[in-house]
Image: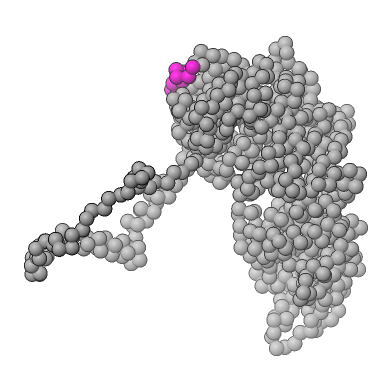
Amino acid sequence: MLVQERSTPKPPKGQTRTLPTLHPNRFSEAKSLDFSTWVSENLYKIITVLLLVATVAALFFLRNVGDTAALLCFETQSKNLEKIELPQIKWNSIATITDKSSPYANFRTERWIVVSVSDYPSDSLRNLVRIRGWQVLAIGNSRTPSDWSLKGAIFLSLEQQASLGFRVVDFLPYDSYVRKTVGYLYAIQHGAKKIFDADDRGDVINGDLGKHFDVELFGEGARQDTILQYSHENPNRTVVNPYIHFGQRSVWPRGLPLENVGEVGHEEYYTEVFGGRQFIQQGISNGLPDVDSVFYFTRKSGLEAFDIKFDEHAPKVALPQGVMVPVNSFNTIYHSPAFWGLMLPVSISTMASDVLRGYWGQRILWEVGGYVVVYPPTVHRYDRIEAYPFSEEKDLHVNVGRLVKFLLSWKSSKHRLFEKILELSFVMAEEGFWTDKDVKFTAAWLQDLIAVGYQQPRLMSLELDRPRATIGHGDRKEFIPQKLPSVHLGVEETGTVNYEIANLIHWRKNFGNIVLIMFCSGPVERTALEWRLLYGRIFKTVVILSGQKNPDLAVEEGQLEQLYKNLPKIFDRYGSAEGFLFLQDDTILNYWNLLQADSTKLWITNEVAESWTTVPTNENKDWFSKQAEMVQKVVSTMPAHFQVSYKESVTNGQGITVCSSEVFYVPRRFVADFVELVNLVGPLEMHQKVAIPMFFVSMDSPLNFDPVLSNMIYKQKPPTNNSSTLYSAKVPAVHPLNVSSEQDFIKLIRIMAEGDPLLLELV
C-alpha cells in the first residue's frame, strides 16, 4: 500500500511566506508578582498538573505494590482483543449483489482471463486479448495509469472496483496484484465457468489455451481420457517438484520447500486416474518459469535473461490426495467447482500469497473429489532481468514446509464446504500461517461468492481417511523424463552436468532415508538456511539445533553439553528413517566419500587419535573424575549385554574415555539401545563427550564399528592464516572449519565443489 507523507501546505512557487512582524518595544503592562494573584490566575494549570502526577503515581502503585486486579483486568481485555475469533455467518441471509455500475452489467460469458495491470498494456497482454472465445479482464491498482485502455479488454479501475459492492474490497491493498480477487468475483458474477489466472508478461504458446489445457471437463467437448498420476505409495512424500517430470531436474518452482530441492530423482513408476475432475490445472512456463529468488539469484551470471525449455511432449500428470505441488497465479485454469480457491490472502507477502493459496486450495479440493493436474509448457514468459528480494519470500521459505505437514493432518467435522473453508482459514491463523485479517477476508470472500450466485459444490468422502490401496504391477505406468539442457552460470548442461546429476541421484539413493542432525554454535540467522540447502539435497531431512530456539527458521533448542538427551525425540519423530547422522557445524561432511560405509553399523571417530582419547582420573575430584563417577554409576545399572560390552571395550579402570563427538552415526537397529542408555543416564549431568563414547562401546564392540571416519582430517585448532587450507575433498570429513556467515558459506561451497561440482549452482 502506498503511503503518502503529510506535510504543511507550501506557498505557491514564486511566493514567500510572510512572518508576523515583531516590535521589540511593544510590551504589555507588567503584571503584579504577588503570589496569591499568581495562584488565582494559574489555578486550572496547577490542578491539571496535580491530577496527571496523581494518575501516574496510582498506576505505578497498582503495578508494583498494591492490588493488581485493575491492571490484570486491563491486560485480560487486551489479550481478548488480540484473540482470533471465528466469524459467525448467517449463510441463508446473504443478499444478492448485482452489477449496477459497470458498462458491462448485462454482459455474460463462460471463459475469462483475469490479469493484474500496473503499466500500459504489454505486447503479451495484447496477444491475450486476441485469444478466441476468452474475455480478458484487467484489474487496476494504485500504480495503473489513469488513462489505461485496451480494445477488447474490460478494465476495472480502483474507483470501479469500489463501486461493485463486494465486501472483499475493504481488505485489499491498493498497490498489489491480489486485487485480482475483485476480478474473480466480477467474472463469476458475469457467468464465468472457467477462469484463466494469468499475468501480462507471458504469451500463450500458439495462442490457443484449448490445445494445452482441458478447458472442457463435461459435455461433448470434454476429453475423458486417463491421466498419469504420481504414486501415493510413499506416505512420507507430501510435495513434488513437477519440473523434473518435464525435463528440468535442476530447476525448482517457487513455493517448493527448500528441503525438497535436492530430490531430483525421477519417478520409479506412476499410476493413472480418470479425467474429468482436474478442477485446478497448473501450466508450465517456458522462458522464465515460476522460480523463487534463491534460484533466480544463484543460477545466472551477469544480466543474461533466463530462457529455460521444458519437454512439451511429456504427458500431463495428476496429484493424488496426500501429495501437493506449488500452484501460482499467472498460468493456471480454475474450473467452477474450484472457484472458491481463487481467494488471494492479504496478510502475507505478495510473493507468498498465491503459493499459500495453492496449498490451502489443494487441501480443500480433496473435500469435493477434485485434484490438481500439471500440464506441459502452456505459455512463454519473458525474463525482464527484474527480480524481487529474498525478504519478500520469507513467508514461503519459513512456513511452507510446515504448512504442507499441517494441511495433511488437518481434519474437519463440518458438513458444508464453506464452513470447512472458513474453519481451515481460522485454524491457519491460529497456527501463524496468516493473521486474523485473512480470517475476516475469507468470511467476506465466501459471502461475496454466495452474493454473486455461486453454488457450493457437494462434499465427497476423503481418500485420506481410508487405508492406502496397494499398487499392483499391472497398475504401474512407466515414464522416463527427458534430461533437457539448461544454462546456469553461463555453463550449458551437457553430458558432464548430466553425469554430475547422476552422482547426486546416487548419493540421494544412499542417504535419502538418513536424517542429518546438526548442532549450530554460530548465528543460525546467517547459516541455518545455507546448511539446509547444502545437506538437504542429500539427506532425508536436516534437523538443526542451537543454544537458542528460532521458530521462524525451524531451529530447535538444545545445549551441546547434553545434546544426546534431545536425540530420542528426534528418533521417534522419524520412525521410518534408516539412521541418524549427527554433525556439529564446525565439521564439514564430504558425503561423496561415505558411500562405502555400512549404514547398518555404528560410525564414530574411535580411530582418530585426537578425537578419541583416554584420560586418567585421580582422587582430586576434578571434572574428569566427577564424570568418571557418573559413568561408573550408569554402568552399574546397565543390563547385562550393555555392561559386558562396555567392560570388554574399556580395560583401563583408572581412566575415562572421551570423544569430541563432532560426528557420529546411529543406524535404525541401534536406536532403541541408544534411547535406553539415555534413560539410564537420567538426570545426571554427564557431558556429551563422555556419554557418547560410553553409549557406543556399550551398544557394540569397536571392532564392529564402520571405519569410514578413520581417515578424516582432525585438528584441535584451525590454521592461523586460512582455515580453508585445512580442507580436502578426498576425506570423509574435516574438522575444524568454522562457518559463521554467508561469505564463509560461499567460500566453503567453492572448495567443496571439487567433490560435488553441482554445488557451484548454489553460489
Total marks placed: 0
Tell me: 239 left or right of 74: right
Classify 54 as above or below 106: below
At 69% from the left and 85% from the top, the residue drawn is 621
At 51% from the left and 23% from the top, the residue drawn is 450
Classify 198 as above or below 573: above
User: Is residue 590 found inside the magenta-colored segment of the image?
Assistant: no
- What secondary structure is the stretch in magenta mostly built from? loop
Q: Does residue 56 appear anywhere in the picture?
A: yes
Estimate the x, y position of residue 447 in percent, counting from the top left: 49, 27
User: Is residue 101 found inside the magenta-colored segment of the image?
Assistant: yes
At 56% from the left and 46% from the top, the residue drawn is 432
Estimate the x, y position of residue 530 in percent, counting from the top left: 71, 56
Which one is nearer the viewer's eye here, 516 or 287? 287
Which one is nearer the viewer's eye here, 637 or 138? 138
Q: Does residue 282 appear anywhere in the picture?
A: no
At 78% from the left and 70% from the top, the residue drawn is 723
Estimate the x, y position of residue 215 in percent, counting from the top left: 70, 20
Estimate the x, y position of residue 78 in percent, counting from the top left: 40, 50
Classify 523 as above or below 237: below
Which one is nearer the viewer's eye here, 400 or 651? 400
Classify 407 as above or below 472: below
In the displayed image of the protein, which residue is found farthest to the front?
14
Tell me: 683 left or right of 58: right
In the displayed image of the protein, which residue is found farthest to the top?
220
Give the residues drawn in magenta, as a range.
Answer: 93-103
Which one is nearer the viewer's eye here, 278 or 159? 159
